[in-house]
Image: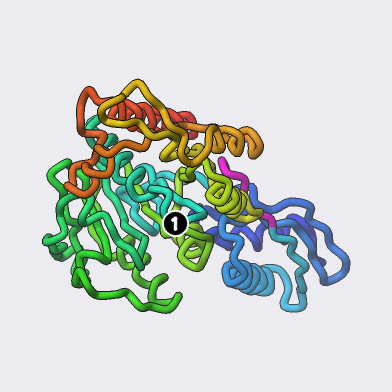
Amino acid sequence: MITENSVMKGLSYVIEPDLKKDLVSAGLVSDVKIEGNNVSFTLKISNPAMHSKQRMEEAVNHYLQLHVSEEITTDITFVALEKHQNKREPEQRKTMHGVKNIIAVASGKGGVGKSTITANIAAGLAKQGYSVGLIDADIYGPSMPLMFDEAKSVPGGIDIDGKQKMTPVESSWGVKIMSIGFFAQANQAIVWRGPMVDSALKQMANDTHWGVLDYVLIDLPPGTGDIHLSLVQNIPLSGVVVVTTPQPVALADARKAVGMFNMDGITIPILGLVENMSYFVPEDMPEKKYHIFGKDGGKGLAEDLNIPLIAQIPLTTSVREAGDAGRPAVLQNGTPQAEAFMDLVKTIDTKIKDLEK
């Protein structure tokens, strides 16, 4: 006779691949019901992708038939783990196990300064004394080699336990960088289909020897496509920062980006919204503010979506010049733009620490 105890014993042989714990001890099984040879129950999993569900269902059926009854059938209701439940210690991860916190920086629309924000967050965290890495996942438009003045650098290689790994380029500002831009000529277009982009992201994450780091920033391409889904399925993100400008066309796309990370089965913590290019400040009239792209659009969106607005970054010539020169503006001590970026860095750091509690 099939009993709840025998079912739970059978399920105790099944390991949740991300948590690295069996389903029973991790408390992932609930609402067990038995009708003859059929068993129905609810199962929480960390990866809601269809292929992950199928693999888990196959494993469950195998061990129940092996340890309970060859005639047993199952009806499984899958639900995604809540945000706090799929938190794992870094050393337990299959991906980037030496990295304590992984933060993605996303935007719905291109041209809103997402890469500039990413570079300054990374450089600002390094300035704070943290060990920091950066993955340039904007495969079609990699910009980090230029923004850190490392366009002529090439990643190295190292043997780790008999496996060849790449080593990231370490910039003068203390940030370790991996970008497809290191492997392509300046005038070479990256014309790849989705699977190749997916493979490139996995290689930059898994085949790079990052070492032990406090933070890794991931600069995502604009939009909500293949690479974004691959990211949430394969890399254990600590949180996401969404970048927009105040104008309605950018806000509409930022809303979609937030919606993607809040989808059932994904639910990555949104650390906050950054309103970039909030206002223009002339170099010769620093007391003036011109709201070229509109005023407080990001503030309104953050309130509407119930997420924090964590920065309003001004549009200044010096921010552009700093990015082109390969020395992020956050390093320009004493300037208003550096102070704005450092406030953003400190806010993100605080929010990550709050999530760890």
**Which amino acid is tagged 1?**
Gly
State whether residue 24 appears in this view: no
* Residue 41 in view in this figure: yes
Disc 1 secondary structure class: loop
Expressed as whole percent of the image width and height from the top left, the position of residue 309 reads 52, 32
Q: Nearer the viewer, residue 170 or 60?
A: 170
> Which residue is depicted at the point 39% across and 76% down?
196
Percent across and percent down for residue 147 are 23, 50
Identify the main secondary structure in magenta.
Answer: loop
The residue positioned 34% from the left and 54% from the top of the image is: 96
Q: Is residue 81 magenta?
A: yes
- Residue with the mark numbered 1: 110
Q: Position of residue 102 (x, y in %)?
A: 39, 47
| Count of labels in the image | 1
Count residues near mark 1 (Cα–Cα under 10 Å), then give few for <14, some for 14-19, many for 20+: some
> Where is residue 141 drawn, in percent x and y?
33, 64
- Left or right: 56 in relation to 320: right
**Residue found at x 37% / y 58%:** 95
Identified at 56% across, 59% down, the residue is: 47
Which span of residues is magenta-colored?
79-84
- 43 versus 328 height, above or below: below
Q: Quadrant of the N terminus?
A: bottom right
Residue 166 drawn above or below residue 85:
below
Q: Quadrant of residue 334?
A: top left
Q: Is residue 87 left or right of residue 265?
A: left
Residue 279 falls in image quadrant: top left
**Up/down of 337 relative to 187, above or below:** above
Which residue is at the front of the view, 267 or 106? 106
Q: Quadrant of residue 23?
A: bottom right
In this rendering, the answer to whether 352 lies above or below 210 is above
Q: Is residue 155 left or right of residue 263?
A: left
Q: Is residue 179 magenta?
A: no
